[in-house]
Each structure stands twice: as C-alpha cells, then as structure tokens.
Image (spheres, rainbow, N blue to C red):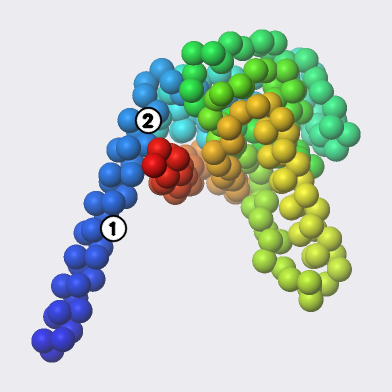
Amino acid sequence: MHKKLNHLKFYLKFFNLLLSVMTILFISFEQSYAAGDTVIVYYSRTGKSEVVAKAIADTMSADIIQINDTRGRTGICGFILAAYDSQMEHYTQIEPAAIDFSKYKNVYLVSPIWNWKISVPIRTLLHTANFQGIKMAMVTTANIDIKKYENFGDEAPFIKKFLRDYLRDNRQGMLNLAKSSKADIIGHFHIATEGLSGEQIEAATAAKMTKSLAAISCRSMTERQ
C-alpha cells in the first residue's frame, strides 16, 4: 500500500512538472508571436477553411486576410474546375492581387486540399508574394485525413501503396512550393472536416493548435540556444 502511494505521488509530481513545462513553452511561444506580428491568410471555397482560419486568428489575436479567386468555383462545375486546375497546377487571378507582408513576422496559410494538392488561389499566392524572412505555418483542410494511408507498409495491396506514395509526394510537393516562396516553414497541420459542424471544426482546430504551438515553441527555443 505504501509503495502504491509513493508511485501515485511520483506520477502526480511528474504530471505537474509536465504541465509546468507546457505552460512555459506556451507562454514563450505567445511572447514570440506578439500582437500585430502575425497574420492568418486563407482561401475557402465552401466556408470550412474560413472557420479554421478565424479560429486560429482568435487564438493568436492575429490579423486575418481572405484571398478571393476571380474564377467561379461554386457548385458542381466549380468543384470539377477546381480539381482540374489543381491537378494541372494552374494559377489564377486572386484578390487582393498583392499583399505587403513586410510588417509581419509570422504567417498562418490556410488552404483546402483540391485533388490532394493545395488550392489554386493559395498556390498563386505562394508563387507571387514575397515571404522572405517570414515564418510560415501551413494549415490544410479536406474531408478526410491526408495521412489516411500513411501507415500502410510495402506488404499492403498495390492500390493502398499507390495512394500512400501519391499522397506523400503531393504533401512534399506542397511543402516544397511553400519553401520556394522563401518563407521559413515551421510546421504543417491538417483538419479533416467531413461531417463536422462549424463548432466541431473550431474544436478540432483548437486541439491541433495546442499541439502545433507546443511543437513550434520547442523549435524556437532550440534555435535560440
């Protein structure tokens, strides 16, 4: 009985220590992301990415900028056009056509996934904007988890291995595109939105943000050492 109590005390102390460390990391991250230094930039075809972007902006007390596509993307025709343009890696005309990011240190870029690739309006933004010296976190949304097939090994059926490699390649392509903008990519997280209400999407975003903030804060502290 005495040993069990000692074990319980040990686990409680360990939990309190872990909680203290996480709190310090979170505070450190928030201090590094001062008000006015961070902007959330998003494109949303159906409104789900907008929910995610606004949830992040509220959490970070950050500015928010919406990217609009001058091409029609609504309805089934818009859906097909979006998939085609994304697959062909086309660009489009966006509004605002130019954004001055010079006053920001940090950017959260929020985009839906189209045909397993980043949306065309955000692709266009990455191609045209100057993100030199800016820390960028990529946030993507789609009906399903883009890592759905990640755990399949080489012994899996051909179609599952094909999808695993196809998704890996497209995710890496997205990160390479972001890096080509000369931004410092500090992370990426994804929100699966199928069947979720706006409130549930907000909750899922908050959960992912907690993990993301801790991871990015750890990286920032390591870089300072």
The picture quadrant where one finds residue 162 is: bottom right
Image position, residue 133 (x, y; %):
56, 24
Q: Residues within 10 Å of mark 1 (few under 14, many from 20)?
A: few
Residue at image point 54% right, 38% down: 186
205 and 40: which one is in front?
40
Q: Amino acid at mark 2?
A: Ser
The answer for how far apart the CA atoms under marks 2 and 1 are is: 21 Å
The reply to whether residue 203 is in sight is: no
Q: Amino acid at mark 1?
A: Leu
The residue that mark 1 highlights is: 18
- Quarter of the picture holding the N terminus: bottom left
The reply to whether residue 1 is in sight is: yes
Residue farthest front in this picture: 225
Q: Secondary structure at mark 2?
A: helix
The residue that mark 2 highlights is: 32
Residue at image point 56% right, 45% down: 189
Image position, residue 12 (x, y; %):
20, 67
